[in-house]
Amino acid sequence: MRLVFLGAPGSGKGTQAAKLREHFDIAHISTGDLLRAAVKEGTPLGLQAKAVMDAGQLVSDEIVLGMLEERLARPDTAKGFILDGYPRNLAQADALEGLLARLGQPLDAVVKFEVPNEVIVGRCEIRYAAEGRADDHPETVRKRLAVYAEQTAPVAGFYQARGRLVVVDGVGPVDEVFQRIVSALPAR
Ligand code: AMP
């Protein structure tokens, strides 16, 4: 099963990806996690990405695509994967189509999480208190939501036009949202 999770920051993509990963025995690939690991390690790429991430902006398409390509080459993706946080703009969606076509691994579905902004802001405040992620600061969350609306939201139309978009209500208990996702996925 090869999936993309699409949704605003704090819409539950990471939480649900962890559950689906277990359910289908597939890899969970979060480009945000890959970038945070690079920042922590202090790699040149990480140093470059940090300021952009802290400002709530998008890291360059080239850097993220390179990281993703490397990650997809690892053996734990054999049964499939969930991309959590990629693609985040139309150029990345295009690049992903090309990459997966080359690998002979087309997507089965793109799951879009629908969560109202006021719920998102509340969830990010809780995560900020718990994890202290600089980009969960309320002001940065507003910036990230604007970036999402402007650059990432159009990606849903890209996949809808290709008949692969599944829209799921992301509000409610974690297990209920999980059941909604599983029942909305195409049968394999
Ligand atoms: P996330 O954990 O998915 O919310 O990502 C945290 C931050 O990492 C984002 O706000 C961006 O700065 C950066 N990032 C993650 N994924 C991407 C991507 N696909 N393209 C560009 N920047 C990304």
Image: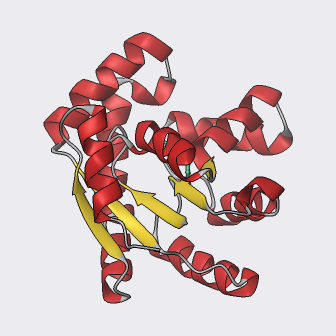
Quadrant for residue 152, please give it.
bottom left
> Height in image: 180 above or below 173?
below
**Visible in this render: residue 56?**
no
**How many numbered discs?**
0
- Please indicate whether residue 46 sits to the left or right of residue 130 in the image: right
The residue at the point 43 percent across, 57 percent down is 5
Q: In this view, does 182 lie above or below 164?
A: above
- At horizontal 29% and vertical 59% (from top left) the residue drawn is 183
Q: In this view, does 96 lie to the left or right of 56?
A: right
- Camera-side residue of 81 and 86: 81
Q: Can residue 143 be seen in this view?
A: yes
Residue sticking out furthest to the top: 129
Report x, y in % for residue 84. 51, 52
Q: In this view, does 47 lie above or below 94?
A: above
Image quadrant occupied by the N terminus: bottom right
- Residue shown at 33%/74% (left/top)? 165
Compare residues 84 and 94 and report the one nearer the observer: 84
Of 117 and 78, which appears nearest the observer? 78
Residue 181: image location, x then y, percent: 32, 55
Residue 62 left/right relative to 151: right
Residue 112, image x, y percentages? 32, 60
Vertical relation: 56 (above or below) 139? below
Q: What is the quadrant of residue 38 in the picture?
A: top right
Can you give x and y, in whole percent of width and height, for residue 8 in the image? 33, 48
Residue that lies at the very extreme toward the front in this rendered image: 188
Q: Which colour scheme is used?
A: secondary structure
* Residue at screen point 20% across, 46% down: 115
The image quadrant that residue 163 belongs to is bottom left
